[in-house]
Image: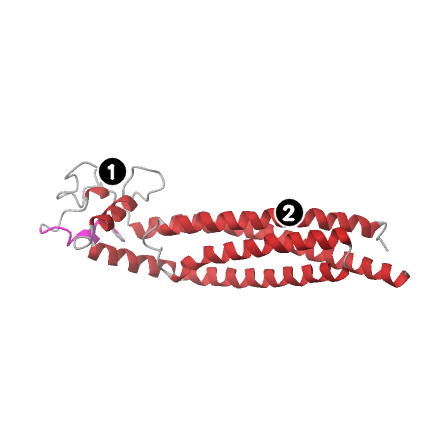
């Protein structure tokens, strides 16, 4: 027996919201890929445990993508068990997302310590590492592109004290205008060198991205909770129709 009246309206609303869920799942997949690429290109965090967060986003996005399709079929066919399964699976997804949010918050609290340790390790290994490694560190500090951090050292230029025998030189990538030899004996020259440490620059960059992710997650959570409410209402309507029969 087909649903009618207000329940029929809920049926189409649930179908519409499942379409939005489908888009949200696709958005999470894209967001996870973008964040994973960004982390991979940020050497100070590419190997820490927190870099698993984008993988979680991608997995959750794929699951939501298929659950939304499942919900659309249940709403269109007015199948009580399909709609019930949709509501249960969506509730589990919300629980997983809450867990991911808690893990992200914990990682955020350790962010400064992790970044500081990685930066100092990179600086200590700079002279003895491969050309590719030095190029990666240089690109992180330099100014050729807006995505780079425009910084020098972990906390300041003084972190490069052991870079050269004079203890006053820094890599040329610390220069505001990069030229060959521009970092020679210029460690404390603010007109030529960036004095801000990369620790603060990386933290600011990541916190800015976290704010975007939080806003997106709140929007998706609202849609998911609304979908669960509509699913429950539709289940009630379908069951009432069976009882009438």
Q: Residue 40: horizontal and vertical position, in percent?
A: 37, 51
Q: Residue 159 in magenta?
A: yes
Q: Is residue 97 magenta?
A: no
Q: Secondary structure at mark 2?
A: helix
184 relative position to 30: left or right: left
For disc 2, the neighbor class at 10 Å (few under 14, some 14 to 19, many from 20) is some
Picture quadrant where residue 142 is located = top left
Residue segment shown in magenta: 156-165
Viewer can see residue 133:
yes
Q: Which residue is mark 2?
A: 20
**If you read the primary sequence from the N terminus, does the residue marked by circle 1 or circle 2 appear first?**
2
Near-viewer residue (163 or 23):
23
The answer to which of 164 and 191 lies nearer the viewer is 164
Residue at image location 71% in from the left, 52% down from the top: 73
Res. 108 in view: no
Q: Mark 1 highlights which residue?
A: 176
Left/right placement of residue 74 relative to residue 149 reads right
């Amino acid at each position: 027996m087909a649903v009618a009246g207000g329940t029929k309206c809920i049926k189409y609303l649930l179908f519409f919201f499942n379409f939005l869920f489908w888009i949200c799942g696709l958005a999470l997949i894209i967001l996870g890929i973008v964040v994973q690429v960004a982390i991979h290109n940020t050497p100070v965090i590419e190997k820490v445990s927190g870099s698993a967060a984008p993988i979680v986003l991608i997995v959750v996005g794929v699951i939501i993508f298929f659950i939304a399709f499942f919900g659309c079929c249940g709403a269109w066919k007015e199948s009580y068990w399909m709609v019930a399964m949709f509501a249960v699976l969506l509730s589990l997804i919300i629980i997983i997302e809450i867990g991911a949010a808690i893990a992200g918050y914990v990682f955020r609290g350790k962010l400064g310590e992790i970044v500081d340790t990685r930066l100092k390790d990179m600086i200590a290994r700079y002279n003895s590492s491969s050309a590719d490694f030095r190029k990666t560190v240089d690109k992180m500090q330099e100014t050729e592109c807006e995505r780079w951090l425009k910084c020098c050292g972990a906390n300041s230029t003084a972190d490069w004290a052991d870079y050269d025998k004079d203890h006053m030189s820094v890599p040329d990538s610390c220069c505001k205008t990069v030229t060959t030899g521009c970092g020679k004996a210029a460690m404390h020259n603010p007109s030529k060198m960036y004095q801000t440490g990369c620790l603060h620059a990386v933290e600011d960059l990541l916190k800015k991205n976290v704010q975007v992710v939080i806003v997106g997650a709140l929007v998706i959570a609202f849609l998911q909770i609304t979908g669960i409410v509509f699913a429950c209402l539709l289940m009630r309507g379908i069951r009432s129709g069976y009882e009438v029969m």
